[in-house]
Image (spheres, grey):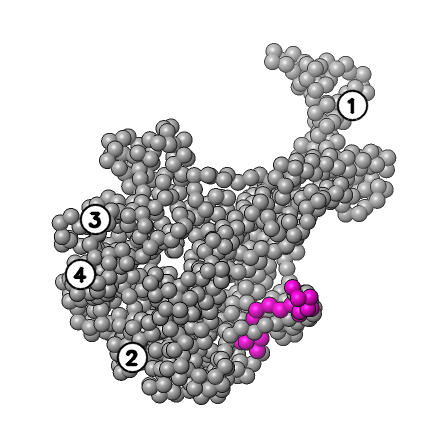
Amino acid sequence: MYKILKHTGTPRHSGRYPWGSGKDPQRSRSFLQRASELKKQGLSEVEIAKGLGIVDSQGKPSTSKLRARKSIVKAEQRQADVAEVLKYVDKGYSNVEIGKRMGINESSVRSLRNAALQERSDITRVTANMLKDSVDKKQYIDVGLGVENHIGVSRTKLKTAIAILEEEGYRTHKFDIEQVGTGKKTNMMVLTKADVTYGEILKNKDKIRMITDYSEDGGRSFLGLEPVRSVDSKRVKIRYAEDGGTDKDGVIELRRGVDDISLGNAKYAQVRIGVDGTHYLKGMAMYNDNLPPGVDIRFNTNKGKDVPKDKVMKEMKDDPDNPFGATVRQKHYITKEGLKTKGSSEMLRLKQNGKTYSEIAKVMGVTEETVKKCITIKALNIVNEEGEWRDKWSKNLSSQMLSKQNWNLAKKQLGLTYDSKKEEFDEITSLTNPAVKKKLLDDFADGCDSSAVHLKAAALPRSSWHVILPIPSMKDTEVYAPNYRDGERVVLIRYPHGGIFEIPELTVNNRHADAKKNLGDAKDAIGIHPKVAEKLSGADFDGDAVLVIPNSNRGVKTSGSLKSLVGFDPKEAYAPYNGMITIDGGVYNEKTRKAEYGNKRPRTATKQLKMGDVSNLITDMTIRGAGDDKIARAVKHSMVVIDSEKHYLDYKRSYIENGIAALKKEYQGGATRGASTLISKAASEKRVGIRKEKIDPLTGKKTYEYTNETYTNKDGKIIKKTFKSTKMAEEEDAYALSSGTLMETVYAAHANKLKALGNTARKESINTPYIPYSPSAKKTYEPEVASLKAQLNIALKNKPLERQAQLLANTVVSAKREANPGMNAADIKKIKGQALVEARTRTGAKKQRIDISEKEWEAIQAGAISTNTLNQILNNTDADKIKQLATPRTTKTMTTSKINRAKSMLASGYTQSQIADALGISTSTLSSALG
């Protein structure tokens, strides 16, 4: 007769450990029950140990191990019960209700609850003490979002610990800092002692620290530059205008095979080269195998021989962090001694990867001095290198350029832009995960609003950015362009763009011997005759780039140069005079050929404002059909304004002599008026009161509730707070900005379609429900959930690091502006970029994208991730990968919107191969869909 043992479970059917089966805590309870039952039957501890298989190393029953096992199991069981009680406490259940759910009496619940709260209190107190110690050591510490990930506690526990310290007199300060580069705001939350005021924090933002400090790396400068290495001026020859320097103005010719000025594998690069420690050369560097003996560098200039060598070059700025006034990359090479030293190649590799000399020394197990003897810095400082121009700027057509073309071309390219947007919308609405759909719809809607303001149109087929280089022996009707077909016609577009008279149309000649020798299969450079550069609104060969567009069908219209612009030199026509007030507020000194500011801080935004003003005037005049003579007057003035800071030109005389006031009155409605057509108005600034945004669920339109916030200025006057918006963003109907021309009608229709599509996306988002959170799915996909949360934890850890980088960069930029009051907006932009790159290097700030696997996506689809956590994951992952995962796996048929887009692209001159690439489909699928 056989006895059958059945596991029937426990009476408790809810809570953390239901049904009496599962993981260790349930088995732990069974172990204690079995040991207790054996003891009630009168068995001794030795017999119980033997019965339960608890033996020592010799196989004998061990009572000491039995007692230890009981202690461990009791501790595990109590810890599990404490955790479960705490879960119910957080949900607001009473002790009686918790007892019912756990199958224990109320007094046991009370005991467990006290232990749970004590444990939570202990953790919070420890966290508070740690924060207190950090404040005592560092004065101001960052306790904003993401800090909890660094110290290993929950956000709730961190907030509670902060609240404890606030009760003890410590203070938290909340404020925003401007992100370097984007202008957006980053929220800061800083913990300090009680006596620290808000004003003190704002004055000492650079002293705010993370709880775990970043490495200060004293071996680097504020902008990450090592001391610049200069070449001896004896190695440099100037090729003046009289010798042909004008034809290659801005080109720096280098001797091949010289280590400290080597371009490496590149054929060309935009560079800065220090000379004698006081001056530098700026321009495009190329090799020349026919340099005179003893000359390693030849600089081409359009200046005459009456200009001394040091005046041809530029003076280094009195700023070791930024001597060239540009963002540069320094390169290194192995010295002669390094070539004899083992490991020098690895040293060079580490240096190229951003390691400091001291870090390399530690890795290699040598002294820092040894490293410096083996590798050293080049005199060549890189701004841009071969291959970096092609994708540097958007290939889409700006309204500034396209609105000066035929309205049919504008309508066609804007139509392609909308088709692309509509196709993207259709793809998003077909996604299977609601949270992903909502996130992408919201982003898409914002993108539509932005596109309606900036009014960029789809790029023309095969267009790409290229840097221009001079080939004097080439015809001025030809271009060497190895990325285009020999014999085809192309047009070159350069911004700022005055009109079709500044667009050269050239024939590709890739057989030209000189060009082929100098440029070969250049990745992103074209060779042109110097006269072509003149037509490109006076472009130079020091790094200027153009958008190259195939134009065999003559879709882009061009014209001959305006007669009055031929030979016009703004530097000669409007040269400065002693005592003249420059455009940025300085007084020109003829002897020193520069503007002296004294104690006066220049208005660095003046040039940008005046350039924007005259650019808008040219656009409005063109759209309203102004004649060539009038257009030429405005273009002349724009040429003066654009060079007014660099060469201290007399922009005021230009304004008067070119009759700009009269042109503004005729085409903009008044001498002091601005933009008058939709094209120029769209992105114009409009100040708007502070408000809260809402979305109308029926229409998807944005509605606003104005808060009427104010502030008191330094004169004690109450001023209404406002922020910067644009006229197009604030206008519901784009036609309201139009003066009624045909071109404006094309753009207004396009803008309204984008606005409507954005509203549709917002409406769809509001009406998309979330996937409900599923605890059972979380358990099923436990490894995947853990992986996603671990990746999120790493991603969120970057937030405090990024805040530290922004604080450090802001401090550097402020110091640079204070020390150099003459910096213009372009200089400041460069400094911001350099400062942020270096600050991120110092702090280790680097955004880590979450890589979601197929299995992890299954977990998300099953509801294993809460909505809040999923939104955080979506904010830290690749949107295209998410879209791919969320797209239903259906047969690869094309949607109606895709077919329409394909037909439009085909009609615009794209090949089927190009269309298939753009749509992400095969050419066979495309051919089948098009019939």
Give the label, 1 or 2, closer to the camera.
Answer: 2
Query: Would you say residue 104 is visible in this rendering?
Result: no
Tell me which residue sits at (53%, 73%) in the image: 685
Which tag, 1 or 3, sits closer to the chain's start? 1
Q: Are marks 3 and 4 in contact (CB under 8 Å)?
A: no
- The residues tagged by marks 1 and 2 sit, at their Cα atoms, a distance apart of 104 Å
Circle 3 crowding by C-alpha within 10 Å: few under 14, some 14–19, many from 20: few
| Percent x, y of residue 470 | 22, 64
What's the magenta region?
714-731
Q: Name the element at disc 4.
A: helix
Circle 1 crowding by C-alpha within 10 Å: few under 14, some 14–19, many from 20: few
Which tag, 1 or 2, sits closer to the chain's start? 1
Give the label, 1 or 3, closer to the camera.
Answer: 3
Residue kind at label 1, given as amino acid type = Ser
Tell me which residue sits at (56%, 81%) in the image: 733
Among the 4 quarters of the image, the one containing residue 150 = top right
Query: Which label is found at residue 234?
Result: 3
Q: Are marks 2 and 3 in contact (CB under 8 Å)?
A: no
In this view, the residue in front, 354 or 309, is 309
Residue kind at label 3, given as amino acid type = Lys
> On screen, 35 above or below 497?
above
| Percent x, y of residue 921 | 39, 64
Query: Which label is found at residue 36?
Result: 1
| Percent x, y of residue 477 | 20, 74
Please check the rendered image and state whether residue 729 is part of the magenta-colored stretch, yes or no. Answer: yes
Q: Name the element at disc 2.
A: helix
Circle 4 crowding by C-alpha within 10 Å: few under 14, some 14–19, many from 20: some
Give the label, 1 or 4, closer to the camera.
Answer: 4
- The residues tagged by marks 1 and 3 sit, at their Cα atoms, a distance apart of 97 Å
User: Which residue, given by chain and number where applicable, does mark 4 sit on?
Assistant: 516
Tell me which residue sits at (22%, 69%) in the image: 530
> On screen, 33 above or below 714?
above
